Image (cartoon, rainbow, N blue to C red):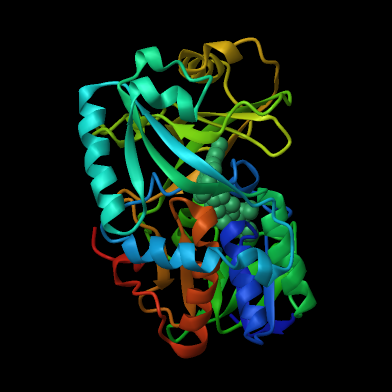
Amino acid sequence: MKTMNNASFDAIVVGAGYIGSSIAYHLCSAGLKTAIFDQGSIAAGASAANFGNIQIQDMELDKSVELIKLGRTFFSTLENELDWKIGLRKIGGLLPIENENQWNVLSDRKDALNKIGIPSEIIPGSLLKDIEPYLDSSILLGGLYHEFEGQVDPFQLIWAYLYRAKQKGLTEFFHTQVTGFDIEHDKIQGIHTSKGDFVSKNVILCTGAFTRRLGNSIGKNWNVHYVMGQSMVTEPVDFILRNHLASAAFFEESAEVEKGTLIANMAISQSVHGNILIGESMYESDQYPTSVPGKSLPAISSCWVKYFPRLENLRILRSWSAPVADVRDGLPMLGPIDNIVGLYLATAFRSTVIITPLVGKTMTQLITMGKSELNIESFLPERHF
Ligand SMILES: Cc1cc2nc3c(=O)[nH]c(=O)nc-3n(C[C@H](O)[C@H](O)[C@H](O)COP(=O)(O)OP(=O)(O)OC[C@H]3O[C@@H](n4cnc5c(N)ncnc54)[C@H](O)[C@@H]3O)c2cc1C
């Protein structure tokens, strides 16, 4: 049944996190009459929960090479393009190495990174203090170091995208949940929402961890899961961290874990305001809690105190939890949905911050030209797993 009685748009973006706000900005810049919807307010999902680190360490380095390289290129001019201070600062990235297995895995990763033009080196344990003075290097064999990573203020970046998009005509619908789609003859015609129906022949889902639920509403079983990422933040202190750090354990072969099992790893960086951002423990879940269960806090603390004993007495101001979309092959979902013309997906990126401009441009090219400069073959949402 067709019940469309609301406004009509060239394109509708669902989800106002990093990905949706960038896509909305680029669609508006290309002259498309665009609307963005979010069930909460701006950045109601993982985008408000993250550290804003521009990191390359955790990217998939086989099929994602072009994504990383083009992503870096476009990111380098972003602040100028948006004409907005997004809190961009250059810091290094360091992965401390505890054992021989990690040494081997990260040595291979160093070679792979250098091969694609991202200068990386293994620093021996005895020299780690030169680049990270408070790190307890006595427990470490060394670390994988990238000098050229960085950090932004997540809220400033998302706000800048949406503010500039609004200046180019974006219409925003916050606190409006998209509940389903109007599809006729295998073509998208619009969306159903908690505030009525809206018409568009292009609908882009940037719905992160919530994507599967929307797919189910049209009989699709998209292979996107999510893990709950949990973190905390300390009171501000003098600048003591020079890099953002993450456990090398992230890269060790891990066996399939049972739902609900808590995996704690160290991820730590310092914000521009001096607060120390500390993560993270993760577990797979079917729910979307925003608080951190009691058992997670000691799990997180024991990880970072082991590396930074001198930070042990810092006061924790707040802890939080958010669902992060995850696809088992480590690749994002980016591109058109099979057999529904006009419906697109853009979710589950690793190192989301750095690829936001590239994804915005790519989706806009797909919608306006039917093809993109970035080869998205490996990222097609309904690829065979
Ligand atoms: C603790 C922590 C630290 C992290 N640190 C980093 C980091 O330093 N660097 C980095 O690159 N990444 C980091 N990440 C990962 C990063 O936060 C995510 O990859 C990123 O935010 C995903 O952005 P997104 O726009 O795809 O999804 P989200 O930000 O989750 O946005 C999805 C949006 O869709 C909306 N939505 C969903 N369903 C509907 C619906 N039916 N109707 C309307 N709206 C809907 C949601 O409300 C939400 O706002 C971190 C994550 C966590 C949890």
The image quarter in which residue 137 lies: top left
Give the quarter of the figure containing the C terminus: bottom left
The residue drawn where x is 43% and y is 51% is: 350
Question: Observer-nearest residue: 235 or 296?
Answer: 235
The image shows residue 139, relative to residue 224, as above or below, that is above
Horizontal and vertical percent position of residue 320? 63, 31
Q: Is residue 329 visible?
A: no
The image quarter in which residue 121 lies: top left
Give the quarter of the figure containing the N terminus: bottom right
The image shows residue 232, relative to residue 72, as above or below, that is above
Q: Is residue 341 left or right of residue 301?
A: left
The image quarter in which residue 203 lies: bottom right
The residue drawn where x is 43% and y is 35% is: 94
The image shows residue 41, relative to residue 133, as above or below, that is below
Number of on-image labels: 0
Horizontal and vertical percent position of residue 347? 47, 59
Q: Is residue 259 left or right of residue 6?
A: left
The residue drawn where x is 66% and y is 37% is: 271
Horizontal and vertical percent position of residue 126? 36, 20
Q: Is residue 272 visible?
A: yes
Q: Is residue 253 left or right of residue 138?
A: left
Question: Observer-nearest residue: 341 or 345?
Answer: 345
The residue drawn where x is 46% and y is 35% is: 285
Q: In the displayed orientation, state which residue is furthest to the right.
A: 167
Horizontal and vertical percent position of residue 43? 67, 52
